[in-house]
């Protein structure tokens, strides 16, 4: 387990902070994850409703609307919007659109699936739990965008019960991924388990923990 605590980095971020640890240099450790266009959800939200979509106007919330499920709220979201989730468990792989914030409205929110982020996507106060049996590497969170994406106060837990690797957070896009005050862990039954692994973009961490069954960080 690697404990990260305000170690200086040299890249800009979206939190108003400048002290990060840069993780990973050189070539990608894993093959990039291919992100589909638009909204990609492999299964509908179960037993949850009242997802609030807040749309911005001139820097302020201009209006809000309530949707019966995460799928509908994300489908309606545009750049600059926030989707607020009530407590509960959401099942399925999710793609968060560019410059959209996905966050808890209060209480425990768990997404059982993989998250694909895009440029300036942000995830706040959410647990991401992914368990699969795969011969290939699986990724809890991946930023596929060419600009940064952000995690704040999140827990990411990834387990591959098959022969492949398990990776907590990854950046297949050149924008990289910034994490603040998150616990990120990954284990694999037969393959390698990495809390974080570099792709085309770097991983930056401030104030959190990385844990991996093989090592906290995967890099070549």
Image (cartoon, rainbow, N blue to C red):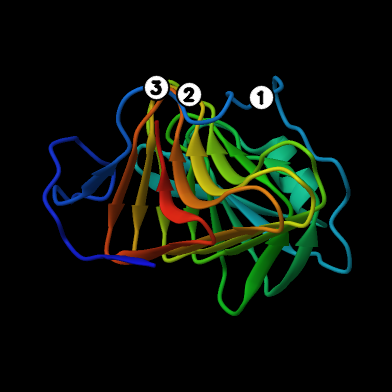
Mark 1 and mark 2 in contact? Answer it, CB < 8 Å.
Answer: yes
**Residue 68 picture location, percent across and down:** 82, 57
SS of the residue at dot 3? loop
**Residue 70 picture location, percent across and down:** 75, 52
Spatial CA span between label 3 and label 2: 13 Å
SS of the residue at dot 2? loop
Q: How many neighbours does mark 1 have within 10 angstroms: few (below 14), some (14-19), or many (20 or more)? A: some
Question: Exactly how many numbered labels are in the figure?
Answer: 3
Q: Establish if 123 lies above or below 6.
A: above
Answer left or right for 170 relative to 39. Answer: left
Q: How many neighbours does mark 3 have within 10 angstroms: few (below 14), some (14-19), or many (20 or more)? A: few
Marked residue nearer the N-terminal end (3 or 2): 3
Q: Establish if 36 lies above or below 68.
A: above
Spatial CA span between label 1 and label 2: 10 Å
View extreme (bottom): residue: 107
Q: Which residue is mark 3?
A: 27
Marked residue nearer the N-terminal end (3 or 1): 3
Mark 3 and mark 2 in contact? Answer it, CB < 8 Å.
Answer: no
Q: Which residue is mark 1?
A: 35
Q: Residue at x 75, y 64 (%)?
A: 50
SS of the residue at dot 1? loop
Return the mark for residue 173. 2
Q: Quadrant of the N terminus?
A: bottom left
Determine which quarter of the picture holds residue 128.
bottom right
Spatial CA span between label 3 and label 1: 20 Å
């Amino acid at each position: 387990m690697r404990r990260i605590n305000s170690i200086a980095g040299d890249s800009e971020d979206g939190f108003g902070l400048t002290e990060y640890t840069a993780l990973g240099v050189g070539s990608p450790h894993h093959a990039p994850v291919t992100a589909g266009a638009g909204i990609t959800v492999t299964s509908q939200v179960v037993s949850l409703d009242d997802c609030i979509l807040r749309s911005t106007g001139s820097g302020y919330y201009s209006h809000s609307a309530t949707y019966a499920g995460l799928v509908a709220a994300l489908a309606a979201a545009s750049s600059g919007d926030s989707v607020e989730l009530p407590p509960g468990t959401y099942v399925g792989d999710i793609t968060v659109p560019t410059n959209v914030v996905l966050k808890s409205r209060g209480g425990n929110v768990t997404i059982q699936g993989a998250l694909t982020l895009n440029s300036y996507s942000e995830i706040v106060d959410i647990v991401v739990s992914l368990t699969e049996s795969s011969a290939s590497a699986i990724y809890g969170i991946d930023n596929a965008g060419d600009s940064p994406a952000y995690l704040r106060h999140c827990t990411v837990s990834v387990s591959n019960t098959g022969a492949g690797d398990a990776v907590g957070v990854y950046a297949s896009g050149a924008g990289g991924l910034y994490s603040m005050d998150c616990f990120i862990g990954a284990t694999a039954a037969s393959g390698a388990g990495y809390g974080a692994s570099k792709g085309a973009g770097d991983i930056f961490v401030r104030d959190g923990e990385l844990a991996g069954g093989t090592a906290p960080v995967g890099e070549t």
